[in-house]
Amino acid sequence: MATQRINPPSVYDGAPIGMSQACVDTDSGLVFVSGQVDWDRDSRVRHATLADQAEGAIEHLGSVLEAAGSSLADVLQLRVYVRGELADAMAQVVPVLAGHFEAVRPALTGVGVASLASRDSLIEIEAIARRRLPA
């Protein structure tokens, strides 16, 4: 199995903690994307609200997928982690997810958690996708 590591310059640098933004199994074409948060290049949260952080995380997810030869339309599975009780976050998160994935309808797991990568982070989104097939 050959692995390609994906680390686009538009997303924060995970090298200091030993991570890649995504790894691609080049044999199967599966893309495994690390949890994406609403951070700038200096690992600082960009937005205050859960909905805006969800948009920011999906923006980063799209950038990482594009660098891997994939896209949001190729997502097979999403895992969404929100700080606190998941049920309390649904009204803010579901419209954002539906706006990006309604036609795709990937497998989805939502998890409420006590903490995330930084104290100000409210949501983290990871994905498994496939690379686009050549035309």
Image (cartoon, rainbow, N blue to C red):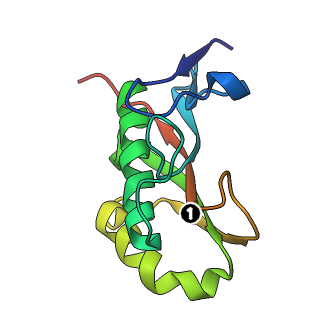
Q: Is residue 46 visible?
A: yes
Which residue is farthest right?
114
Left or right of residue 135: residue 53? right
On the question of residue 103 being in view, the answer is no
Quadrant of residue 95 in the image? bottom left
Three-letter code for the amino acid on which mark 1 is drawn: Ile
Tell me the residue at 47%/36% (across/down).
Answer: 130
Query: Dividing the image into 4 quarters, which one contains the C terminus?
Result: top left
Q: Position of residue 82 (x, y in %)?
A: 61, 69
Where on the picture, by quarter, is residue 121?
bottom right
Please state which of residues 3 and 63 is positioned toward the viewer in this rendering: 63
Judge by depth and name the residue closer to the eye, 66 or 122.
Answer: 122
Image point 71% across, 28% down: which residue? 17
Q: Is residue 125 left or right of residue 74?
A: right
From what the image shows, is residue 83 above or below residue 132? below
Q: Toward which corner of the image does residue 20 lie, by quadrant? A: top right
Tell how many labels: 1
Image side of residue 92 versus residue 17, left or right? left
Quarter placement of the N terminus: top right
* Residue ID for mark 1: 123
Q: Position of residue 8 (x, y in %)?
A: 42, 25
Residue 115 on image: x %, y %: 73, 64
Asked if residue 130 is positioned above or below residue 96 in the image, the reply reads above
**Crowding at mark 1 (Cα within 10 Å: few <14, some 14-19, many 20+):** many
Q: Secondary structure at mark 1?
A: strand
Q: Position of residue 5 (x, y in %)?
A: 57, 19
| Residue at far top of view | 2
Front residue of 62 and 42: 42
Residue at 41 percent across and 43 percent down: it is 60
> Which one is nearer the viewer's eye here, 89 or 118?
118
